[in-house]
Image (cartoon, rainbow, N blue to C red):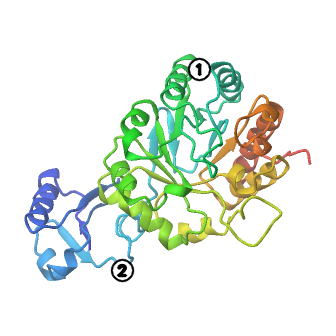
Amino acid sequence: MLIVLDAKASIASVKQIQSFLKDHGIESQAHSDLYSQTIVAPNASKKFTISELESFEDVVRAVPITSPYKYASIQGVNAPTVIDIGSIKIGDGSLCIVGGPCAVESKEQLFNIARYVAESGVKLFRAGAYKPRTSPYAFQGLGLEGLALLEKVKKEFSLNIVTECLDNMTFDEVEEVADLIQIGARNMQNFSLLKRAGRSTKPILLKRGNSASLNEWLLAAEYILSEGNSRVILCERGIRTWSDHSRNTLDLSVIPAARKLTHLPIFVDPSHAVGRRDSVLPCARGAVAIGADGLLIETHCQPEQALSDGSQALLQSDFIDLVDQCREIHKLLQGKTTLHLGF
């Protein structure tokens, strides 16, 4: 149920309604902006009639949320969610670019990459301390040592850290270092992990599973949101199809489709979607043009020596070129500049 309150309703009034709901076993979340105040209360319609909820002094109206996901639905929050990470705003119409290697391999490797990522103006640095790999014999990441190196990168280059958490056992350690915690495609329906992420104080980047529908993806986000963490970013990273020309099939059509259903920001990871260096830039341009809030881009100073996913990692010059071009496209769509891509 969506409970719409008078825009001038007091905090005490909002809390009174939420306390009433909780006393009857109904969890809820309050939202406010410059023009409205609302309470989203899943399952409230099973216990109360609309007239019962509208009897509260500051309630303007109560409207059933028909979507299977209540907190993620645009029916419950009528403005885009904006997430602050340091000085960065995500979901406010700006373009956020995240750059870095697939995995933390060494201090030298990490610092070399972090240096040019920072010089490009990118503020979010991605690298995996823990890596889920298809083969048990492949490089699994440096673990706690990798997190310690990411902490050094944060201090040395003033970068915000994006890194993946694989399980509940290591969540606390990842949470301590990360500014944005990634839940990977393999864990999109790891419901225990999603619930733990929902209790985190850090924003969560939720990647789409490689065979997940949009509905399943949003319901996975609902697990996080229903635990109280409202700072969730969706990330499209390609789905498995019959095509064999790329690692996965990048589903850019899911972005406008998701916009009609959810208020959450949406990122695109073209690197993992295509799995080949020469396709990353054009797919990144397409993602920005179709309205993505951000990009995850893999880059490596020596991709031929990378311990994981070197074939999709951009060289320094290619990464900087991508950042420049995608910013130009974004500015063009915002009506701020003339496009000069040089291709």
**Residue that mark 2 sits on:** 66
Q: Looking at the image, which residue is at 15% across and 60% down?
A: 18
Q: Residue furthest front?
A: 137
**117, 102: nearer the viewer:** 102
Disc 2 crowd, CA 10 A, few/some/many (<14, 14-19, 20+): few
The residue lying at 80 percent from left, 50 percent from top is 276
Location of residue 92 in the rendering, given as x and y in whole percent from the top left corner:
52, 49
**Residues under numbered marks 2 and 1 in contact, where contact means CB atoms less than 8 Å apart:** no
In the picture, which quadrant includes the N terminus?
A: bottom left
Please identify the quarter of the rendering in which residue 156 is found.
Answer: top right
| Disc with the residue nearer the chain's start (2 vs 1) | 2
Q: Whole-percent x and y of residue 194?
A: 39, 55
Instruction: Tell me where residue 283 appears, x and y as whole percent.
Output: 76, 55
332 in relation to 18, above or below: above
Q: Which residue is mark 1?
A: 157
Give, as a three-letter code, the residue at label 1.
Phe
Q: Where is residue 54 drawn, in percent x and y?
A: 16, 75
